[in-house]
Amino acid sequence: MTEVEEVKARLDIVDVIGQYVQLQRAGRSFKALCPFHSERTPSFIVSPERQSWHCFGACGTGGDVIAFVMRKEGLEFPEALQMLAQRAGVPLRERQRSQDEDRQRERLRAAQEAAAQWYRQMLLRSEAARGAREYLERRGVDAAAAEAFHLGYSPSAWEATRQHLHELGFSDAELLAAGLLVEGESGLHDRFRGRLMFPIRDLRGRVIGFGARALDDSPSTGSGQALPKYLNTPQTAIFDKGGTLYGLDRAAEVIRQGGSAVIVEGYMDVIAAHQHGFANVVATMGTSLTERQVRLLKRYTQSIVLALDADAAGNEAALRSYEVAQEALSQAEDQEETSPVVTFWRGLIRCQEVASVDLRVALLPEGRDPDEVIRADPAGWRQIVDSARPVLDQRFQVVEARHDLSSPRGRAGAVEELLPLLGALINPVVRQHYLRQLSRLALIGERELAGMLASARTRRQTSPVQATAATPAAPAKGQAREEFLLALLLQYPHLRPEGAELPEELLWASENRQVLAAWKQMEGIEAVKEALPEELTPHLERLLNRRLPSFSPKEAREALADCRRRLERRQLEAEKQALAALLAAREEDLGPSALAEAAVSAATADERTREVVSLDIRDMEMGRKLHRRGNDGDGGEAAGMSSDG
Ligand SMILES: [Zn+2]
């Protein structure tokens, strides 16, 4: 048993979650108001048998006890594990790799913090910062907002910051590693000079890097070249731009409570939003939206709005500033030749699908920043955000407007732009929906479109499958299947395209989710190991050592598809069970006569009654869904079922 398993085995999920939310018995499970979204009737279920929780309301997610604590406390896996280990009385092995590195990181953070203080003082007091202060005033940033975001000014000298930090005991090596210095032709000098400074913080509010904006009167280089308007701290041991969102340290709680997050592009946009009471806004710091950033947000909400310039949304040239969520694309797609616009949108869809979040796009009036919109008309901003639409709907609208759909050439153009996007969809029901939409628009049969799509993505195998090796019973069965799936991915590298599409939520054990997430981000066993918290090394090793039958590439692919199907089925079954429990509890509350009445006149029934009826309907639908899945090729398990379609 690994440490992680031991911690989980010693804790009862009902106790742990019971500390955060008030649980009520519902059949063999417990129900509660979901702590992750606001609701008036419970859709949050904890199952003591499976030691798992599930919200089948707005969140539509679940997991084990560690996943709960990570989400509830906003912690990373190791921190959540640490917390639960303490509670369970399981001593965790000393983390070895850390000691030295931790000390180094600590020094880098201290240097960043000291620099932030220094820049702040400069902005407040230095004569040279007059331009910066005037700029903030012009842009309507008030003193409270400047203080809250700890804005600063970097002196426009080559060594002022370096010298100041030397006096505080930091070495050149440390300052270089922190990205505060840069190696020039004539040696080391300050990276940020004569700029407005935006400290970037991690989730715990610690400064990990800076964004820096040139001021209009900032010095240009000798050669008269224009300096970049924005400079950022480069990637360092503590600063990972693609895994950080500006403002999230201040926005996280608001996002969790309000249930949605808005992503903008720039520092000033975030500051303006917060200053005007829209504290759920964060920024990607200039360019790309990455899958990691989406995952980061997902800890707080499922519902994410990306605010895009209307111009950028449709226009290739304007899009160039959005570096596209490359990380989210699989290799195969990287190699395909498509326009940047298509790549960008496909990247967004892929982000949404892989992280399974509800990603919407809000269009800003052409050529205007969120910053400008918010200051000019806060109510207008709210309206823009509220009118956000699902990524693909937005895309359809733009493409429809741009092509002359009365001509065959125009329709072909629309298909060319939209079809690749449908290929990025994972959920077959959703894909079918958009295929239908495209079919109507392009006057091509759905089947033909599906064929075109399939030939564009031949790498993805969806062939039906024979059952894989039998696995042991009950709760352990699911866990074993999760591990089997991971072992497949780790041991058969050619499964990457299929594996990249697996939603992590499919796995219930946090340790397995972590491994899947690391595997998606990194190629090669060593890199995966690096990316995982050290506590998970034993778990990873077990997966690597797990003996698998020697599959041919095709068999491995089929085994993976089969595994996935079974895990999806498990998900549906759990949901069905939870629904049934909730329904039973609710019906009991209400009594049979109210239900009968509701059946006769649903329109006049009170809200609670209507809810039971709707639960009833969902329950039936779920049953049908399960039944259908049972019939499509789930091997032996379905053999006994009738097929009345
Ligand atoms: Zn929920």
Image: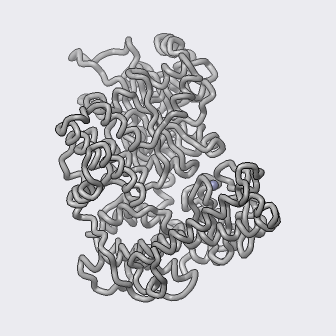
In the rendered image, residue 349, in percent from the top left (x then y), is placed at 38, 48
Relative height, residue 332 to residue 280 (above, below): below
Relative height, residue 203 to residue 312 (above, below): below
In the rendered image, residue 547, in percent from the top left (x then y), is placed at 36, 85
Q: Is residue 329 left or right of residue 594?
A: left
Relative height, residue 113 to residue 631 (above, below): above
* Residue 65 visible somewhere in the drawing: no
Image coloring type: one colour
Q: Quadrant of the N terminus?
A: bottom right
Q: Residue furthest front?
A: 600
Judge by depth and name the residue closer to the eye, 249 or 406: 406
Q: Quadrant of the C terminus?
A: bottom left
**Which quadrant of the structure image shows residue 491?**
bottom left
Q: Is residue 442 left or right of residue 351?
A: left
Task: Count the labels in the image.
Answer: 0
Rendered-image quarter of ligand 1: bottom right
**Which quadrant of the structure image shows residue 441?**
top left
In the rendered image, residue 446, in percent from the top left (x then y), is placed at 29, 55
* Residue 372 visible somewhere in the drawing: yes
For image coordinates 38% across by 81% down, the residue present is 545
Judge by depth and name the residue closer to the eye, 204 or 642: 642
For image coordinates 23% across by 15% down, the residue present is 224
Q: Is residue 166 left or right of residue 257?
A: left
For image coordinates 58% across by 54% down, the residue present is 59
Judge by depth and name the residue closer to the eye, 253 or 181: 253
In the rendered image, residue 390, in percent from the top left (x then y), is placed at 45, 43
Relative height, residue 305 to residue 155 (above, below): below
For image coordinates 30% across by 16% down, the residue present is 220
